[in-house]
Amino acid sequence: MRHLGRKVIEEKLPDITDFARIYQGVEPLKEPVPVQPTAHYAMGGIPTNVNSEVVRDDKGTVVPGLFAAGECACVSVHGANRLGTNSLVDLLVFGRRAGRQMARYAGQVERPLPIADALEPVRAELEAIRGREPGGESVSVIRKELQDVMMDNVGVYRDATVLTVALNKVNELRSRYGKVSIADCGSVFNTELLEAQELGYLLDIALVTVTSALARTESRGAHSREDYPERDDKKWLKHTLAYQGKDGPNLRYKQVSITRFEPKPRTY
């Protein structure tokens, strides 16, 4: 930003200037400011209906008693890329609808009994990590390699070649994750154990993301395939649904419900 001069930089860009000085140790008046993409908004992953009830398939079958609203939910108000201020719709409109529907649901069902063995799968997952001998795969190393491949190969601009490389790498990391060990084997406030568990979930989501992107042979919204640069409404005007399979995600698709506004290219 050096060419802008002191007056513009300090008076019109005070926040950016302070961030660069405080967090990067860079003087914007004299030095280049590092620029890097970052996550701005999550456009939903849990499919829901307009009452914020989670649905399990392309027919809109409701999962009883399970609700989602906000950035985690996909009620399909965004299309394939979030529009400005639509986060308020996600939060306020569907948060309110979720609360109302929860109240209605709670008034119609009996209080459920505790599930006797609900803890066992989670306990087994944690104990498998906690019980391994030290010296195995490192959580931080696998997480860094996962971050690098997702940043480099699964950014906004993709093609089959880089996505295939990413798919192979994520599968490799998932295999190595089975040998992860930690130094802190305590059972109280063990943040290292929780980070190791979280890494497993990050690998699951990464695999779904790469597999879905590789299958969608078009460009739409935040998904830009350089080998398929055009949008293909005839084949791909549909949501991707991912189900856990033995050898990786099984993909199915749900049709998009179009009412008043048809999808159009996002231009500026």
Image (cartoon, helix red, strand yellow):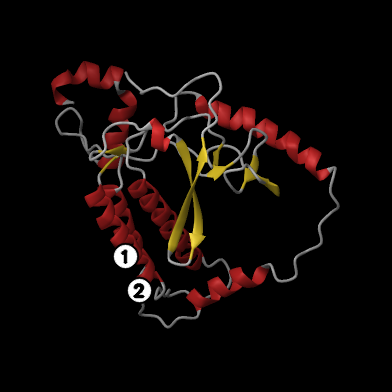
The amino acid type found where label 2 is placed reads Glu
For residue 40, say whether it is visible: no
Determine contact: label 1, label 2, CB under 8 Å. Answer: yes
Counting from the top left corner in percent of width and height, residue 74 is at: 54, 38
Tell me which residue sits at (68%, 67%) in the image: 118
Which mark, residue 4?
none
Mark 2 residue element: loop
Q: Dot 2 corresponds to which residue?
A: 137
For residue 262, side relative to residue 122 (left or right): left
Counting from the top left corner in percent of width and height, residue 136 is at: 36, 78
For residue 174, side relative to residue 252 (left or right): left
Quick one: 192 or 197, which is closer to the camera?
197
Image: 92 above or below 7: below
Taking the view exactly as shown, the residue that stands out farthest to the front is: 234
Identify the image quadrant of residue 139: bottom left
Image quadrant for the C terminus? Answer: top left
Q: Dot 1 corresponds to which residue?
A: 141
For residue 197, say whether it is visible: yes
For residue 62, side relative to residue 205 (left or right): right
Counting from the top left corner in percent of width and height, residue 47 is at: 56, 42
Quick one: 97 or 193, which is closer to the camera?
97
Mark 1 residue element: helix
Counting from the top left corner in percent of width and height, residue 81 is at: 41, 31
